Amino acid sequence: MSGPLLSVKDLKKYYAGDRSIIDRLVGEEVDSVKAVDGVSFEVAEGETLGLVGESGCGKSTTGETVLRLREATDGQITYDGQNLLEMSDTELTTFRRRAQIVFQDPFSSLDPRMTAGAIISEGLRVHGTEDASQRRETALDLLENVGLSPDQIDRYPHEFSGGQRQRIGIARALAVDPDFVVLDEPVSALDVSVQAQILNLLEDLQEQFDLTYLFIAHNLSVVRHICDRVAVMYLGEIVETGPVDELFEDPAHPYTRALLSSVPRVRSDSREEEFATLPGDVPSPRNPPAGCRFHTRCPKARVACRETAPPAYDVGASDDRVATCFRADADHLYWDSEPIAENPNRS
């Protein structure tokens, strides 16, 4: 296949704002929640792209919209050369076999009234595998593939630990033989000791089944372990993208630097001293700041950041290493504009 398996361009997902009783009485309109606002990225066949950022930045909404679990407000999603937003019902059914999701919470994402075998094989039934014995055989094989015993097939979710439940969720996603899997914070609800086991399992399954992953997370240590490339999100936008090692060793966007400074390290360095904490609160996605959305919290922000949204600049040796920060442009008027004095942690 030539080109990326998944291409997302200028994707937007807005939610209508809830109107209070007073808003209704006075006829006030409420701003939409701009959960995802102009996101673009590509995922090559066989790779793992990490999508990272603080809670509420739009990561999970992006993943669900890519799978059409939520309908996009605007933009383009191309999967294996097909426009996902223009697919017919038949084409969409085929796509749903090729693209699956593993949810964050292994406790609430499994039906407590169904056995492990029924949960895993449900997708096969929905997609037309009528032979119950064949569905059960597939479930038995997948239980072994994810490190569980076949004799656990008739147990219910409450009889499993959190890590075991997540293995069932992974097996469920693999049952219909997908090419692409969205992993929505798949280890964040698990103990640290179990997280490593699940990450290693995901890597093994990726090689065994030729899978492509979109790995959504807020834990950057986890991302570095499993991802090939990383896209960093802030307030509905992607602010930096690049190969995982390059981005971790030399982050170009101040927000990325701040996130990385929060990762525990054996020794401190200048990066940690410069961004000891990330000050301020995340602005509301109903009314995000003009210009660079990070300027209200950025210790490097200047007046130019408040006035104009920065484009994506090439910032590294790799073709896909970009960051939306004026500091990447040595000739930009940013350098001549005044610092925003009221910003916290001004440096």
Image (cartoon, rainbow, N blue to C red):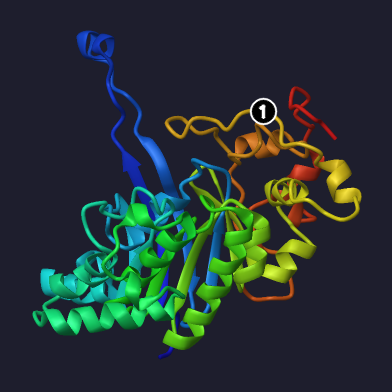
Q: Secondary structure at mark 1?
A: loop
Q: Is residue 344 left or right of residue 42?
A: right
Q: Position of residue 97 (x, y in %)?
A: 25, 75
Which residue is more in the foreground, 98 or 285?
A: 98
Q: Specify whether residue 129 is in view.
A: no
Which residue is more in the foreground, 322 or 138?
A: 138
Q: Is residue 201 left or right of residue 307?
A: left
Q: Residue furthest bottom?
A: 1
Which residue is drawn at the image coordinates 17% and 72% (left, top)? 93
Q: Is residue 67 above or below residue 125?
A: above
Dot 1 alpha-carbon crowd within 10 angstroms: few under 14, some 14 to 19, many 20 or more: few
Which residue is drawn at the image coordinates 41% and 65% (left, top)? 182
Q: Amino acid at mark 1?
A: Gly
Total marks drawn? 1
Q: Residue furthest left?
A: 130
Q: Position of residue 315 (x, y in %)?
A: 72, 65
Q: Position of residue 211 (x, y in %)?
A: 44, 80
Q: Is residue 238 left or right of residue 22?
A: right
Which residue is more in the foreground, 258 or 8?
A: 258
Where, by quadrant of the figure, is residue 203 drawn? bottom right
Q: Specify whether residue 209 is in view.
A: yes
Q: Position of residue 283 (x, y in %)?
A: 54, 30
Considering the image in quadrants, where does the N terminus appear?
A: bottom left
Q: Is residue 292 above or below residue 210?
A: above
Which residue is drawn at the image coordinates 76% and 27% (left, top)? 344
| Residue at which label 1 appears | 280
Which residue is drawn at the image coordinates 27% and 13% (left, top)? 23
Considering the image in quadrants, where does the C terminus appear?
A: top right
